Amino acid sequence: MDCRGTRYQGERGAVTTTREAPADLPAPVSLAGLPAGTRAVVRMVRGGQTVVSRLGAMGLVADAALEVLQNRDSGPVLILLRDTRIALGRGEAAKVLVELAS
């Protein structure tokens, strides 16, 4: 199995990097779907160059640990990342794929 990943052009010009996870690891889930109090680790950010760059500048990069502070049915998702509270729109949060922290 090749662990380097594959880079391809997705819908509407979005650049996506995929990486096959070993079978014993859980599949990443969207940050937008996590309840408050959940701790997770960022695995991938999907989207175009602008979104990936913007979220990366805020610290949402691979292997960054975070905690969901607030996630109601509507409105922004509030997270704690490196001692900083960050409010993400639901669309942005949906593009962040995370793995639950143990």
Image (cartoon, rainbow, N blue to C red):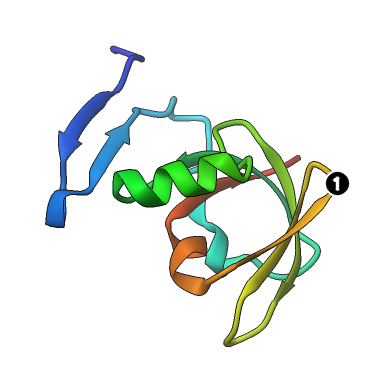
Determine which residue is flagged by label 1.
Answer: 83
Q: Residue at x 33, y 15 (%)?
A: 4
Looking at the picture, how far across and down is residue 77, in whole percent?
A: 64, 70
Quarter that holds the C terminus: top right
Q: Can residue 28 be spotted in the picture?
A: no
Position of residue 53 in the picture relative to residue 11 (left or right): right
Q: Amino acid at mark 1?
A: Asp
Q: Residues within 10 Å of mark 1 (few under 14, many from 20)?
A: few
Position of 92 relative to 16 (above/below): below
Q: Inspect this view and state whether residue 18 appears.
A: yes
Residue 10 left/right relative to 46: left
Task: Identify the image quadrant of the N terminus.
Answer: top left
Element on which disc 1 rests: loop
When the figure is inspected, residue 15 is found, relative to residue 95, above or below; the finding is above
Q: Nearer the viewer, residue 20 or 66?
A: 66
Q: Is residue 48 left or right of residue 13?
A: right
Q: 68 or 53, which is in the foreground? A: 53
Judge whether 98 appears above or below 79 on screen: above
